[in-house]
């Protein structure tokens, strides 16, 4: 796992995205590092991750923090909220390198490299106007570390139409006082194509399945119609399951970290 340095074009893109999102309320950008881990290397990857976390904790490493989500298909996401654009250039492991030395530092990251063939960095934007969390928008859901990701790919020409349908869907959930709360993220810089992802928290798989069933009954025909209207503008729809991994996360002392 690594956090790459971002060039000036990334900063410009984020600045534009941030300005647009601010019009919809309090927005949050996330820098995400994705590792697509080989099935045979899950155990080795998590061992390397825990070694990195321990090294950071033992040395109280500053200037970097991350939450981790793992999906059932072996995708691991290191998620870091970006409060301002300057943070992107400042995020690195130089403090750790100085404290543990070049040899140990290099070995720790070589342990990661053998676990995957594909990995990379990109930005996702939390969209408050499309998210349904009537108790307050937050990525921290205590007691509900299980996650389900619903990804909706959309052509560039249909993003506004899809957003309009997602707003209508949110209004329906609110009118029915649905207990299925969700956060909507839009793809940002570093992604190929446009997509929106609904992230739902639950206690576990059974809790999610029960919640989904109850929500389907609650929304009934109105819900089916609203979902069908959303899907009219969706090019591809994929669902992944997994959960947050606090054992693989790191934050310096006196620092709060967002999840998802």
Image (cartoon, rainbow, N blue to C red):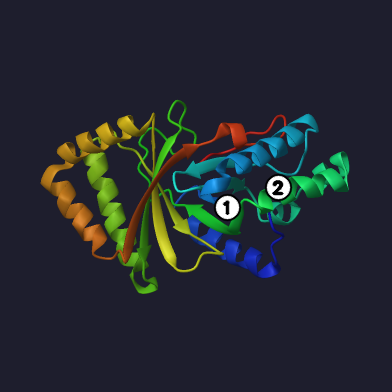
The disc, 1 or 2, on the residue closer to the chain's N-terminal end is 1
Q: Secondary structure at mark 1?
A: strand
Instruction: Look at the picture and state if 75 lies above or below 200.
Output: below
Image disc number at residue 202? none
> Nearer the viewer's eye, disc 1 or disc 2?
2
Expressed as whole percent of the image width and height from the top left, the position of residue 218 reads 17, 37
* Few, some or many residues within 10 Å of mark 1 (<14, 14–19, 20+): many
Q: Who's the residue at 49% across and 61% down the image? A: 20
Instruction: Look at the picture and state if 184 lies above or below 242.
Output: below
* Few, some or many residues within 10 Å of mark 2 (<14, 14–19, 20+): some
Q: Who's the residue at 81% across and 42% down the image? A: 96
Of 164 and 183, the residue lying toward us: 183
Q: Who's the residue at 77% across and 40% down the image? A: 62
Q: Say whether residue 235 is visible.
A: yes
Left or right of residue 122, residue 181 in this image? left
Distance from Cα at disc 1 to Cα at disc 2: 13 Å
Expressed as whole percent of the image width and height from the top left, the position of residue 160 reads 35, 66
Of 188 and 67, the residue lying toward us: 67
Of 1 and 126, the residue lying toward us: 1
Disc 1 + disc 2, Cβ < 8 Å: no
Q: Which residue is mark 1?
A: 35
Q: Secondary structure at mark 2?
A: helix
Q: Which residue is mark 2?
A: 111
């Amino acid at each position: 796992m690594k956090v790459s340095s971002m060039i000036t074009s990334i900063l410009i893109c984020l600045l534009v995205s941030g300005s647009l999102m601010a019009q919809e309320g309090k927005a949050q950008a996330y820098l995400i590092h994705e590792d697509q881990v080989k099935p045979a290397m899950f155990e080795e990857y998590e061992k390397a991750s825990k070694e990195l976390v321990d090294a950071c904790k033992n040395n109280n490493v500053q200037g970097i923090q991350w939450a981790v989500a793992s999906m059932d298909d072996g995708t691991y996401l290191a998620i870091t909220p970006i409060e301002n654009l300057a943070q992107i250039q400042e995020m690195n492991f130089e403090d750790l390198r100085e404290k543990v030395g070049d040899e140990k530092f290099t070995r720790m990251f070589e342990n990661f490299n053998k676990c995957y063939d594909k990995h990379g960095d990109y930005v996702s934007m939390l969209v408050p106007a499309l998210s349904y969390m009537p108790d307050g928008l937050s990525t921290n859901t205590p007691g509900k570390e299980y996650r389900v990701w619903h990804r909706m790919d959309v052509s560039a020409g249909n993003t506004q139409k899809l957003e309009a349908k997602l707003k209508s869907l949110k209004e329906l959930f609110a009118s029915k006082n649905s207990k299925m709360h969700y956060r909507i993220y839009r793809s940002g810089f570093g992604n190929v194509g446009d997509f929106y992802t609904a992230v739902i928290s639950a206690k576990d798989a059974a809790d999610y399945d029960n919640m989904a069933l109850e929500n389907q009954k609650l929304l009934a025909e109105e819900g089916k119609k609203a979902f069908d209207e959303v899907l009219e503008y969706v090019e591809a729809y994929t669902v992944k399951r997994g959960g947050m991994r606090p054992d693989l996360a790191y934050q310096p002392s006196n620092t709060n970290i967002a999840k998802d």
